[in-house]
Amino acid sequence: MAATSGPGEEAGSAPRGRRQQFGTRLLTDPSRLFQHNAWDNVEWSEEREASARNKVQENSRQLVPQDKQDEYERNANEYWNDFYKIHENGFFKDRHWLFTEFPELAPNQNLSQPTSSAHEDGSTRNAGLGSCENGLCSLKTRTEEHRQLDFMKDSNNIIHRLGMDGKATLKLGDLKSSDGDFPGSSATYRILEVGCGAGNTVFPILQTNNDPGLFVYCCDFSSTAVDLVQTNVEYDSSRCFAFVHDLCKDQSPYPMPEESLDIIILIFVLSALLPEKMQCVINSLTRLLKPGGMILLRDYGRYDLAQLRFKKGRCLSDNFYVRGDGTRVYFFTQDELDALFTTAGLEKVQNLVDRRLQVNRGKQVTMHRVWIQCKYRKPFPAGREENGPVH
């Protein structure tokens, strides 16, 4: 994704109002290091690579006892519930880079033009808590008047909510999904965000993509996180359905049928799962995709700063760690992710590593981050092309 710039043009410059794509701001002159907050595709020296490898070997020598590992797995949803009870919607920032990196989330929008939300009096909102600017929404705090929000109303006025045990207020059988009777059944473009948290991805999607045929599903392991989404004033039950879901339980139901989704997005989610369960999860998600549909992923890469900062005694297994709050994280390589997706029958569209150098200009401190970004497509059946059967 690296780009070159023309004479007199700064590497990574972008049209006004449009966010720069990852991989376009290149540090070609070391003397300019502290002129920006981040630099893309920073080459690592052999010494830095060796140092990172040594740090990982050191912090992996002492593993968490197996009984504690079993406890972290058994109570994983409780740890995430506690996380969102403490932080609510104030921990993660809205993902302003989404539509630059993943234009598939708003395929019919002109994202090069800044947008604003107009009030009836003709004024526009300023960016801030609970406002939208350039198509990006920040979360509003929960208010008492929305605590009794009508959680769900689909095109057929079916109201239900999925629980961690796979049960629903109305049984999933009542949805008659095989007959097209399910939330978002009349939509022409369907997106599922897995691991929605407090809504830092789903709300920007709903604000930016104004396609009347759009319907967005979003789920999370944490019931507290889903409550934050459903009680947010930006939640629109005519365009969105938030539900609790355990990715690792085969019997945990989805509200939509197989081969009904255009896009599934996983943002720093797969890394929170037990490595041995990841393949089953990707296989299950793949079945939900239409032929031609895509999984979009961004997650932690091997030797990211977060991995190097772990102390001894926090390692669960190779490149898999537990944080102090009980949540877990895995650090991937490109090959590992490629194997997960291709084994599920998907075709690679993109698989890149983003080595970013983040800069604290005030403290004159640098931080090396490593993330991996992927796009994998579900192929069409043999003899069928995107526009229909081959004649």
Image (cartoon, grey):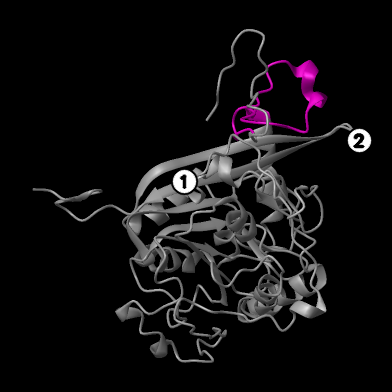
Give the residue furthest to the right: 362
Q: Dot 1: within a 10 Å radius of its alpha carbon, few (fewer than 14), some, or many (20 or more) residues?
A: few
Q: Which mark is residue 363?
A: 2
Q: Nearer the viewer, residue 104 or 123?
A: 123
* Closer-to-camera residue (139/166): 139
What residue sits right under mark 1 in the picture? 107
Residue type indicated by callout 2: Lys
Region of the chain picked out in magenta, as a range: 20-47
Q: Which residue is at a point 78% across and 75% down the rendered structure image?
A: 85
Badge 2 marks a residue whose secondary structure is: loop
For image coordinates 77% across by 63% down, the residue present is 140
Up/down of 172 relative to 60, above or below? below
- Specify the amino acid type for callout 1: Pro
Q: Earlier in the sequence, mark 1 or mark 2?
A: 1
| Percent coordinates x, y for residue 72 in the rendering | 66, 76
x then y, percent, for residue 24 = 60, 27
The answer to if 35 sits in the magenta stretch is yes
Give the answer, above or below, for where 284 lies relative to 135: below
| Residue situated in front as seen by the camera: 327 or 244 | 244
